[in-house]
Image (cartoon, helix red, strand yellow):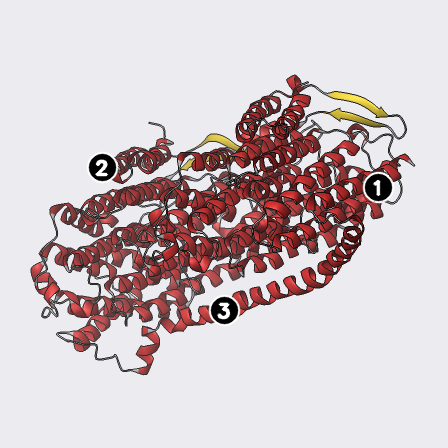
Amino acid sequence: MHPSLLLILPLVSAVVIHFFLQQKRASIAALVGTLVTAATLGLSLMLLGSENSTTLFNWIQVGDFKIDIGLKLDQLSTGMMIVVSGIGLLVHVFSLGYMKDDEAKARYFGNLSLFMFSMTGIVLASNFIMMFIFWELVGLSSYLLIGHWYQKDSAADAAKKAFLSNRVGDFGFLIGILMIWGISGSVVFDEMSLTAGTPFLAAAVLLVFCGAIGKSAQLPLHVWLPDAMEGPTPVSALIHAATMVAAGVYMMARFFYSVGIDVIPECSAMTIAWIGGITSLFAALMATQQDDIKKILAYSTLSQLGYMVMAVGLVDPNAGMFHLYTHAWFKALLFLGSGAVIYACHHEQNIWKMGGLLKKMPVTGWTFIIGTLCLTAVPGTSGFFSKEGILHAAHDKSHFLFGIAVVVAALTTFYMFRLIFIAFLGKAKNKHAEHAKEVPLIMGVPLILLAVMALFSPFLGSLIPAVDGFHPHIGIEMNLVTGCSIGAFILGLAGAIVLYKEKESDPLAGNAVMKVFRNKFYFDEFYAKLIKVFQDLVAAVVHFLDEFVINGLVVGGLTRLAQGTGNIFRAKMQTGSLQNYAFLFGAGIILVIYLTVFL
Amino acid sequence: MLLALLLIIPLAASIAILAGAPARLTTLGAAALNLILGLFAACCPDCAGTISWLVLESPAIHFSLGLDGMSAVMLVLSVIVTLAAALSGSCPEGREKLWYSSILLIAAGAIGAFISTDLFFFYAFHELALIPTFLMIGILGRGGNERKAVAWKTTVYLAFGSIVLLAGIILAGTQLESFSFEHLAAVENHQNAIALLLIIGFGTLVSLFPFHSWAAPAYASAPAPIAMLHAGVLKKFGLYGLLRVGLAVAPEGMQHWLNLLLVLLLCNIIWVGFVTINQKNLASMLGNSSVMHMGYIFLAIAAAIASGGNIFTADGGLTLAASAAVLLMFAHGISIALSFSLADRIEAKTGTLEMNKLGGLAKTAPKLCFLFGLVAMASIGLPGLANFAGEIMVFLSGFEGWTSDQELGPVQIATIIAIWGVVMSAVYMLRAFRNTFQGPLEAKCENVTDLSLLEKAPAILLSLVLLAVGLYPNVLLNLLK
């Protein structure tokens, strides 16, 4: 079985669905997409743990310079493939139910296949240019899927915002790749060699990291991810929680281990760690005051991605990758669970209009609670073990970051149990929630399987995408770090119980500080102003200058001069039709040539 | 002989049309035949042969045709866009003679310029192609009396560029053994003056800042096939000329003006990028975006200048920078032709190109939406489509030879600033796509029929080329070896 099938299968599926199946055969399209994903999962399992690099073909060759399309297989990439294709398959299956009656079901599954193709390309890329190619292609599939319901203004705008925010990050990423090419002489991961203290290295590392800021939605480019929830919920689970948004972390891990983590300059590493830390804190604060079930999970994803980025910045990408791996399963579970809730409540997303869902939807409810326990790092769950690694790394390097990480842990527990108390416990708050029914089997089974993976993922060591024989620390020992982690959980839970148990409305709603959280620290408003001034205003001024100074005065003057001459001719020759001008023009040119060349 | 045929076919066809042959059929036949012959000639340069007739002894001027890698790529671009242009637009009743013979004349002029291997005819063929361009804008262009002013402005501008260019060519030519391309070599005197004349002359024809303001209005008023042929093919004459002639005769002069060129091309990208963002009309937006994207090709030329000015490697292939320039010229030519072809269909179906009057067109015209989305993505530089391959090569050539023990040079800094352009392209293209195709259905888009097979034909042809070159750029790069 050649590994290139991992790329070929989803690509063929996307092409076949888009061009041959379309809406008339939407059910076949859905089946094709799902079966292909099942096949890639099987293939990924077979390739798990293999180590080699192959070149598929030469993409660009000019003289000695060439860019290849190749695959790099190692524990990092093959483990990541399990995450991508495993969650991909469950999301496909869940979508069979969730998108059953969508009027553009074929387009949906076609774009999902396109996403599987692009994401696989990022994971298996053997060089930076190839990674950038697929990096852009996941951006496209994300754009298409967020804008699935493009007739809604909000969906169309969210898709555009996601693409543009990513583009801003890619601006830096591309410059970073060019600089790395100059510094190390190669863009191939296996051939990059660097020595510590090389000039420009610190800048190059930060520029490459810009790509991760965009894709993994770190501050200050995080604004697109909550809006991306406009897409269908299974898409949010796969792309905007488990895989694509984690690509930034994956890319940094690949990059750091390729050049060697010893050469990464301290200043760039700490900048990365702080960006991750600040993102996790801000996002957690914003999550505490959201009322839309998907938005809560979206901010939670931002916050957890912040954790992972922090681990990368603490020069422990393995810890970040371990958290990426556990987070992928339980966050996909939570998102699909929210999808099941939204499906059962007739597209209601406001948690204050739900309530009592645990009794009505036991499978969804209990799997959701399992996901919550993992996310809030209850000792013994997957989230606990992976978060522990990051807390230890933070504790070793910076007490400030450790403090932030612990506060975020408490906030995570607080906002997740707020969600549980309001949406799943207490009384039903409207008639949709009153009459909610458990989702059909085709959606229930993926939830159960994800719950199993969420619980047992840390114990399946060979699946973990990491390098250098990384073995996670599984066990609970009482020390300062663990104590803080457990203390944070208890504190968060207590806060949620006191404030939200059996409440009908948010007791914190009137608070001025909470209003800031609710309004997401006014980032969107600030950016809207910024774009108005720095883009639209500048564009208007430049357009004005272009029109009236360059075009109007300089060129207009010339044209009028020529026109004046033309008018004299016209008066003399009594014609005025353009043919004659053109003839005169041609004759004039020939005359000039004649005069200059022949005389 | 094959090369002569490539010229004779469109010329003969246009004469036949003027003499009364069925215009559309003759044009399509000639364009299709030329496409086949052009592709054949490009794949097999040896079969193409060369022609050289001495026209004048002193100074030595030959009517000579020949094909090498670079001209082969330009030839392929010309014949593809010609066929697509012949299939695009809707000719007003009774004007078939003018419409179709102009298309063929422009094609003949462009092909002639690219396969000439003598400076004199290289220049003369381009002039030949300009005349029908002006006529078509002035007579059959959009927008009432305004079109006459636009035709005038374009004429004055391009005439200005041509004259300045001619001065440069003559100043260089008098120092050369002959006007033949094989005798092009660095001249001894006045290199700086020659370089400046060529940059301004060729630059004006390619809408280099600040000589760019003719382009967007001209494309917005020109009938679709003319906009496609000029923006897609004819405009590349200036870039091709700078690479082929400018760098050969005045490498040191070009070096002298390198920083000026860098500033001007950054203005093309950033300044015109802002102008493009502010456009409200789809055709003007596309016209301006075409001006903006010229900046990237100039950047590749600047990189070629900075690396010494020799665009050929020891084994006769092209350097990275020159290959990047040629690849991006090709990609841009195809993509801009496709955008104008589709914009024309949008106008034909909805009656407007004002973006605030459009919306939701994806619902009523999904095929049009798909094709426009594809070309928008090409223009944004999405991998898998030809423009990305060209752009990434341009950026790489900007950093070619730079190592970490040097400071960042002017070309590297210009490259970094230029990369911001990919963000700006995404801003205006996605905004246009969003406003035209997405969102709730606007009144003008309600009773729209999707593209018919005939309307789709040119777009599918061009899209397939964009995809083929984007997925496997070597298909084109191999021609350059």
**Left of A442 or right of it: where is B223?**
right
> Which residue in the protein does label 3 denote?
A532
Q: Is residue A405 left or right of residue B179?
A: left
Residues at discs 3 and 1 in contact (Cβ within 8 Å):
no
For image coordinates 79% across by 48% down, the residue present is A573
Q: Position of residue B344 (x, y in %)?
A: 49, 46
User: x, y (%) of residue B321?
Assistant: 65, 40
Q: CA distance from mark 3 to mark 1?
A: 50 Å
Q: Position of residue A112 (x, y in %)?
A: 31, 44
Q: Amino acid at mark 3?
A: Lys
Q: Amino acid at mark 2?
A: Leu
User: In this figure, which residue is indicated by the disc labeled 1?
Assistant: A592
Q: Chain of mark 2?
A: A
Q: SS of the residue at dot 2?
A: helix
State the quadrant of the C terminus of chain A: top right
Tag 2 residue: A31
